[in-house]
Amino acid sequence: MEYRVGAGTFRALNDVSFELPTHRVVGIVGETGCGKSTLGHAIPRLLPQPPAIVRSGKVVFRGVDLLRLPKWQMPSIRGTGIGMIFQEPINSLNPAFRVGDQVAEAVHIRRMRERGLDPTFRRDVQGTDYSRREMPRAGDVVSAPFVPPALVDRAKARSPPVSKELHEEVLSFLRLVRINDPERIVSLFPHELSGGMRQRIMIAMALSGKPGLLIADEPTSALDVTIQAQVLTLMKELMEEVQTSILFISHDLGVIAEMADEVGVMYAGHLIEFGPVAEIFESPRHPYTKALLRSIPNRYKSEGPLPSLAGSVPNLSRMPAGCAFHPRCPIARDVCRHDPEPPFVAAPAGPDGAVHRSACYFPEEVASLP
Amino acid sequence: MASATASAARAAAAGSVEEEPSGSGVRSSVVLFYRILRANILTLVGFVLVVVVSVTALLVVVVPPITHLILGHSLSILPYPPLDTNAFPYYQAPSLAHPFGTDQNGADVFSNVVAALPTDLGIGFFVAGVSLVLGGLLGLVAGFWDTPGTLSGAASVTIMRLTDIFLSFPTLVLALAITATLGRGEIESEIAILATWWPFYVRLTRGEVLSIKTQPYVIAARAAGVPESRILFRHVVRNLLEPLAVYFTMDVGTVIVTYSTISYIGVGVPASIPEWGNLMYGYQDLLLTAPWTVWSVTGAIFVTVLGFSLLGDGLRDILDPRSRRIVASPGRQSSKLEPSS
């Protein structure tokens, strides 16, 4: 994944490779500018191209490499296949429409696909049997034949989403995200709602597509702390109710610890560590992860100045040779400065067999760091 | 976008005002419209001026043929035939019989000014309207499909460079040059103004499209699986309507001023057609001897242009759902609290 800007090219994502098991929550953490959001947007191919260019790599979703899919088929993956919640709830709703209509749009799209009325929709890619009411589960990958556009009732597919049934479903999704009085809320415009309410609407919209994978790109960063807690609680409850895989992107380690089953740590476009959440927090195997953990403020007492990491994230156009982290690394040696980027190796498997991988030459020494 | 405090004030105002005009459909929109007009006195003035001017223009055009059909002979709402020479004593000051006096040819100035209204208003709407459609479409294409390296990207670049070329000439000079080439006449001069007018709409539309299409709500819609065609119409075009409608309304007045200038210089409509620029040309020597002639024509232009400007300004409030409810809420007499973005 690269950005081409002017004459220069920035490699925004490099060697980011991980698996997202069904119905698990994978968290991605990292500093601002490390490529978290780029990753989240790159999966459903939402980055504007150009300037973004995909050099190589794969995004395999239900057995299909999304990066090789023709562009016109991408909309049929989005919404019902991969849903997304964004960082800015303030601007993520169209100011010109009532929120009910916006949720209805998402519900309408899914219903058209359920009925085979969306000509671009490929059931074999989506792999979901939408005739069932519940969320997609691991087992129900069905390969229904691709519906040729000519057979689709185009007039029906374009009919405006206004039916009573649809309205009821919109209300049910608003109730799902704990909105009181949804009958009144649907007729309001986005500017009449608070940030937390808008984020709830966004979550309802994302869920109403019944996606197999939900990408939450810092869903709480733009909210203030109490609202943040509400939204996080809501999301945690929804994870139990709605069976779906979630990629949870955040810069907040506490949030990640709360939400995720597995964690990936990113630095300067690289995935530097990946493993089960407990392992990452207890025995990090990369000095950067260690430094991140050290800089979490203690909630109960002040311990003087917070330890912070000297230096800053390298400029993507002038990446250091060798390991991207070596200029700030306390345990860097010659091999880190000159050798190509350290391989992403797995630690010896723990007792539960979970794989904990990190991109450091000296993972054992990390434990001895302060 | 509005600042944090402004949006907080807005949220507070919106929170306290949940009462929507009761009733549904047409009735509630009429009530809403009335409240918006009442809330801002300038919008009301603009609205009234535009309605009066438009209705008068319509009556001037429509009444003679209809009365001819019904009564067998034409009646006009004009008190006297326009541009009628030697009908009255020359240089009469305004009186009850001649509210705007008479001119050097002994014609009633009021009749002349009102007779010119449909021509000028028609030209205003025609030129601004065609520019809106043509420039709007080109701007939409240039803004929405501007990916470099593709066929549509090349089209986009072509449109914008063409626009730049037209915009690099001074408007009036280019219009005059074209009319001088095409010859004097109503159609010719309208084409001349049109040629200089559409590029502004291309630029405006393209700029708006470029900013709208990177808005988070467009990305969010795309992420929800909304197809591109629907994004274009439902999200981009819908949010374009407001700035374009505001600009268009104000622009009708600007076209009238420019067109009057062209015909004042003497390359617009033939002198036999009553038109404000033509009248002005005829009256220019009377500024000191019979000032009412000049003032009448100037006043007509002023009132018309002012009406469209005020209405255009108020349209912003009417079309934007963010300010609509606040402005139209009962108990609010002004829209001052609403930050205009």
Image (tube, rainbow, N blue to C red):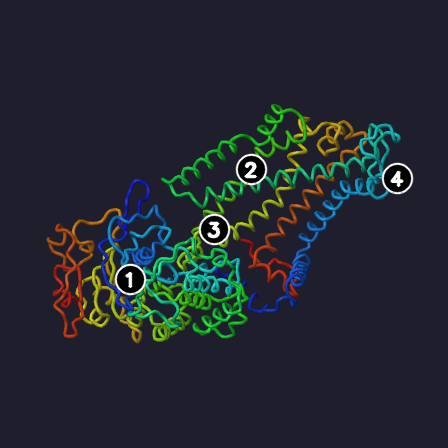
Horizontal relation, residue B67 to residue A60: left or right: right
Q: Secondary structure at mark 4?
A: loop
Tell me the mark number nearer the camera, choosing from 2 and 4.
Answer: 2
Residue pointed to by mark 2: B198
Q: Secondary structure at mark 3?
A: helix
Tell me the mark number nearer the camera, choosing from 4 and 1.
Answer: 1
Which numbered tag is attached to residue B97? 4
Residue A250 visible at all:
no
Residue sitting at x 54%, y 62%? B10
In this rendering, do the residues under marks 2 and 4 share a single chain? yes
In this rendering, do the residues under marks 3 and 1 share a single chain? no
Residue pointed to by mark 1: A62
* Residue type marked 3: Leu
Q: CA distance from mark 2 to mark 3?
A: 22 Å
Subunit of mark 4? B
* Residue type marked 2: Trp
Q: Secondary structure at mark 2?
A: helix
Tell me the mark number nearer the camera, choosing from 2 and 1.
Answer: 1
Residue A259: x %, y % from top left: 31, 71
Q: Residues within 10 Å of mark 4 (few under 14, many from 20)?
A: few
Could you tell me if the residues under marks 3 and 4 are in contact, i.e. CB atoms within 8 Å? no
In this rendering, do the residues under marks 2 and 1 share a single chain? no
* Residue type marked 4: Ala
* Residue type marked 1: Arg
Residue sitting at x 32%, y 60%? A124
Residue A25 visible at all:
yes
* Camera-side residue of A77 and A366: A77
Residue at the left extreme of this rendering: A334
Subunit of mark 2? B
Q: Which label's residue is closer to the chain start, 2 or 3?
A: 2
Q: Residues within 10 Å of mark 1 (few under 14, many from 20)?
A: some
